[in-house]
Image (cartoon, coloured by chain):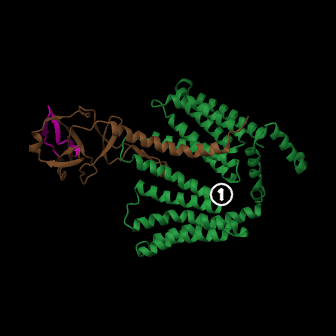
Amino acid sequence: MARPSPNISLIIGLAIPFLMIILVALSIYVPAIFSPQPQYNFLYVTGDDYWNGRQYVVQSGKLIEREIVYRDNYIPQVARIFIHNVAANENQEISFEDAQKLFLNPNSKSPDGWEVVSGGDSGGFFLFSYSSGDYNSMYLQGHNTSKKLNLQQDSSHYRAHFLGWING
Amino acid sequence: MDNIKLNKEEVLRQIQILAARGLVSKEEVLSAYEAGTNTAEDDAVTPQTGISHILYYFGGAIVFLGIVVLIGQRWNTLNNFTKIFATLGSGIAAYLTGVLLGSQERFEKVSMVFHFISALVLPMGLYVTFDTAGLEVNTSGLQSLIFAILTVTYLLSFWLYRKTLFIFFCIIAGTSLFFTFMDYLIIDHSSFDWEFTAYRVLSIGLSYGILGYYFSTTRYRALTGFLLGFGVLYFLGAALALGDWKPHQNVFWELIYPGLVFGILFLSVYLKSKSFLTFGSIYLVAYISKITVEYFENSLGWPLSLVLIGFLLIAIGYMHFYLKKKYLT
């Protein structure tokens, strides 16, 4: 059997990692170019301790505040509510009273096909480590692309909690 | 032994005849010549020189550890200049010493040890330098920059000095660059999970295997064992991982895997690669064990599954022995 030309094997051997990088870059940037811009801002809360039950929930499109009974000597964090502007990737803190005036869609997916997701699991070691996004970060995902969200973080280990898409 | 007795004129005449009939190409003759030029150097390792080589590298590793401990113990008391001088400076000094010693043939092995020390210390030196400059060194972007600097350094070193060791360091640094740069690309995106890393390892394994074949035809064939060994280890390991586990199994990878393993075993004979044969056999055992436990444990029962795996291990062990004896020795 005739062996393939050595020079061809050098070119193919070196090309494989480069092609992999190009394909990954294309899979990230091409869908991002052609995906529609997200249209709906969303409301989220930080510092809402879910071990004792959520303080803020959406019912019938409106934000409501629930009375949470904490165990003795437990000092809960102060929950803060924010509107995230998806176009500018910026946050604006608002009061509960102002947030109550908004009409919210609590579905995970927005009417225009975007979803707020958390960074997933990670593992492996050294160069072979993997992670589906940063665990402490949240992403706007949809239309075969995703964008890291610049959300306000609280001092606890609890991540920001999505409340709903703002419909009006 | 008969081939050795052929005189030079006879060999050259045979090449002329074959060339006239178009049965041998210029590239094949040149590659056979190049493959033979380093034989004396590679075969010259006796037990005595082998021990001294081990001591060289052991000494090099101790020097590296000494630098790490020295810096670690006195990190808070050292000023910025001393931190950089002790790490990056040591790495550059070891590199230059290696270059100077390498210019004399009798110091060739010792020069390789200094290059070995520099290869360990230089990444740390760059890391310390960037950290001292106030940059965030734990980001994939800056790690990519460090490995890019090392890759280019060793590529230029190879271009200047034509030493096999520089290709080896270039491959290590380039592989690290590949992984860290991929991390940099995907860091702001959520949709890349462990399977993506498996595909990265798969592609590096494939690349190593093909480069291993290429270097087997050149005078740098000392790299072949390393590249083929790690290539098949990464490639078959990643392909096995991509098959995943019931109920999340990937049917495509589970079905194609036996073909890949037997392809590697076939190539072990073709390339005369013991690492292909050994890792191919090990991964075949791993695959059969995985499939048996995954699908037949409940139907056959655990004890019968063990008996089946045991017999298959014996069969694969014999196949490994037979192929090695018949084709690779």
Q: Residue furthest top?
A: B299
Nearest the viewer among B267 and A17 is: A17
Q: Secondary structure at mark 1?
A: helix
Chain bearing mark 1: B
Nearest the viewer among A51 and B45 is: B45
Q: Quadrant of the N terminus of chain A?
A: top right
Report x, y in % for residue B176.
51, 53
Residue receiving disc 1: B164
In the image, the segment drawn in magenta is A49-69
Q: Quadrant of residue B79?
A: bottom left
Report x, y in % for residue B90.
53, 71
**Magenta segment: does it hold A61?**
yes
On the picture, is B123 further left or further right than B226?
A: left
**Which hue is chain A drawn in?**
brown
| On screen, residue B206 above or below B110 | above
**Which hue is chain B drawn in?**
green
**Magenta segment: does it hold B142?**
no
Residue shown at 59%/62% (left/top)? B157
Residue A102 is at least partly visible in this image: yes
